[in-house]
Amino acid sequence: MQGEIDKLKKRLLPLSGNERTKFFRDLKSYVYVYCEIDDDNRRIPIYIGKGKSDRCFSHLNNLDDLSISKNRRIQNLIQENRLSIDILAYQLDTQTALSIESACIDLMGIDNLTNLVRGQGDNCKRVPLNELTNLLMEKTIKVDPEHSGIAILINRDYRPTFGDLEIFEWTRGIWSKASKTIAGESKYAYATYKGVVKDIYEIHSWVPAGTQEYFTRTLDEKRLATNRWEFVGRKAPEELRELYIGKIIEKKRSFGSSFIRVGYES
């Protein structure tokens, strides 16, 4: 395998010595993509990354652990002579590289790549135009007391590729101490990402986490054993959803909590 890897590196970058050093120095920070070359010679992205120097080759030097799906995929493509490494952007500063990497991963959808995590660029996350307008213009809407409930923050887990069921399943559970806090008295749950309401649900009751079946996520058994909860519910009435979805609702700081009361007088 090492012989095949060395041939691939020489084919992709036929430089050595000072020329190779100058090339990577001039490249500065950059964003790269590992591609599978299909039968029609199309390049299908399988991994997106960013770095400096010869970072784009680093994955080729650590392929021994075949328990990692990325390693298996790359090995197979090398053996079939169908691996390409393309540069998406170059001569960047570090923060710009992070942002472009993040935007590319969000565009492709991380489930379609072998990346384990999303990128880190806060201002290059995939977002609908109407939501971005609200964010940049800092337009907020106050939740009417009649619609009071809890904003459930799904910042850590939400992905732009989520459909309705995925948003619901990451919002309804699994939460610690939920039934004994403000969540227990709330009628509505506002699924909130980066301040923007993604969907709204009626809360019917709270039950121990794992009581209901999940279809789009796998629950952590260790977390299930630590007194966690999930709510039973359904989508809120359409007129309520139309009023708040895509908007930034006024709320207090979370101070690390996943729940924030909204629509209450105090």
Image (cartoon, helix red, strand yellow):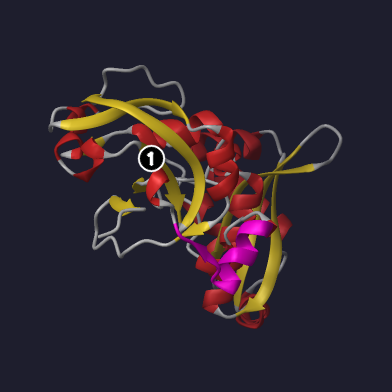
Q: Is residue 142 left or right of residue 213?
A: right
> Relative to 164, does residue 32 appear above or below in the rendering?
below
On the rendered image, what quadrant is the N terminus found in?
A: top right
Crowding at label 1, few (<14), some or many (≥20) Cα neighbours within 10 Å?
many
Residue 245 seen in render: no
Q: Quadrant of residue 17?
A: bottom right
Farthest residue, direction right:
40
Give percent across and percent down for residue 179.
18, 34
Residue bounds of the magenta highlight: 130-142
> Relative to 104, does residue 123 appear above or below in the rendering?
below
Give percent across and percent down for residue 245.
55, 47
> Relative to 148, does residue 228 appear above or below in the rendering?
above
Out of 237 and 75, give the one closest to the viewer.
237
Q: Main secondary structure of the magenta part?
A: helix
Q: Amino acid at mark 1?
A: Ala
Out of 217 and 154, give the one closest to the viewer.
154
The residue under the point 48% across, 37% down is: 167
Out of 73 and 19, give the one closest to the viewer.
73
The residue under the point 55% across, 41% down is: 241
- Residue 70 magenta-drawn? no
Q: Quadrant of residue 26?
A: bottom right
On the rendered image, what quadrant is the C terminus found in?
A: bottom left
Residue 159 seen in render: yes
The residue under the point 28% across, 60% down is: 254
Give percent across and percent down for residue 58.
50, 58
Q: Is residue 260 left or right of residue 42?
A: left
> Relative to 182, does residue 179 appear above or below in the rendering?
above
Element on which disc 1 rests: strand
Which residue does the numbered mark 1 point to in the structure image? 189
The residue under the point 44% across, 34% down is: 201
- Residue 136 magenta-drawn? yes
